[in-house]
Image (cartoon, helix red, strand yellow):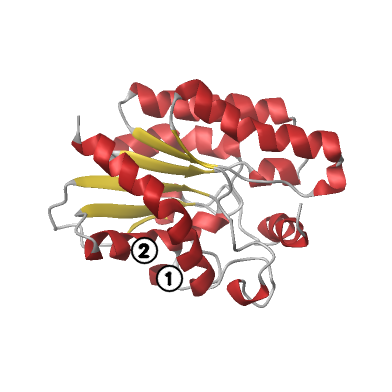
Amino acid sequence: MSAGVALLVIGLILSGCSQEQAVEEAAVASQPPEATYAGTIVAMGDSLTAGLGVDEELAYPAQLARRLQADGYNYRVINAGVSGETSSGAVSRIQWVTASLSPDIVILETGANDGLRGLDPGLLEANLDRLVGLLRAEDIQVILAGMLMLPNLGPGYTRAFAEIYPRVAARHGVLFVPFFLEGVAGEARLNQDDRLHPTAEGYARIVETVYPVVVTAIQRHGAR
């Protein structure tokens, strides 16, 4: 476990944002709503998805949208990140997300705040199971983003936390990104001055990580 990962998870709790934020303010379309798209991608998560500390157009969902358009994938990308949210918070709003945003693909990044608070890993796994199950029941393509936890809760907790994401992805047969912050955590030049949250360049690196998996999800969606 790198020092960068430890700093990251601590930073999530320092973001000063709570789950009680109005969810409707968290979901912001990164492209004009009047345009016609081949499908809708919803990026659902916490501050790492919301883009805490950078302008909206520099958060990873907006950068992903521009990359997709440049490569000829006419998909709308919606940022539905809520800073400070736990997996239980994600469960509490998942039906609103599906009903109001009508996603064809969901990039699900959640759980770091569960680990920060030392919550039972079993709760995180149950919540991820519920989230992914609900999305798949509505024939939505799911990309599950894996997360790692800081080591100060002990090696047993850290290992249990890390093992949850690949297990849930395999159980439901969904697409999987092993570590959402691959190549970003611990890299000072890719993080803001607090060395906790990605800069615009850091978010560009995240796009590089998730992009191939997103393209696979688009291909699966188009093949239905």
Q: Residue at (85%, 42%) from the top-left corner?
A: 153
Q: Residue at (74%, 47%) from the top-left corner?
A: 116
Front-most of 150 and 29? 150
Q: Residue at (14%, 58%) from the top-left corner?
A: 34
Q: Name the disc covering residue 207, or none.
A: none
- Rate crowding at label 1 as few (under 14), some (14 to 19) or many (20 or more) other CA atoms within 10 Å: some
- Rate crowding at label 2 as few (under 14), some (14 to 19) or many (20 or more) other CA atoms within 10 Å: many
Q: Which quadrant, please, contains the C terminus?
A: top left
Q: Residue at (46%, 29%) from the top-left corner?
A: 132
Q: Name the disc covering residue 62, or none.
A: 2
| Three-letter code for the amino acid on which mark 1 is drawn | Leu
Image location of residue 87, percent across then percent down: 59, 37
**Quarter occupied by residue 185:** bottom right
* Dot 2: element: helix
Image location of residue 79, percent across then percent down: 39, 55
As drawn, is 155 to the left or to the right of 62?
Answer: right
Pointer 1: what residue?
58
| Three-letter code for the amino acid on which mark 2 is drawn | Ala
Looking at the image, residue 136 lies above or below residue 84: above
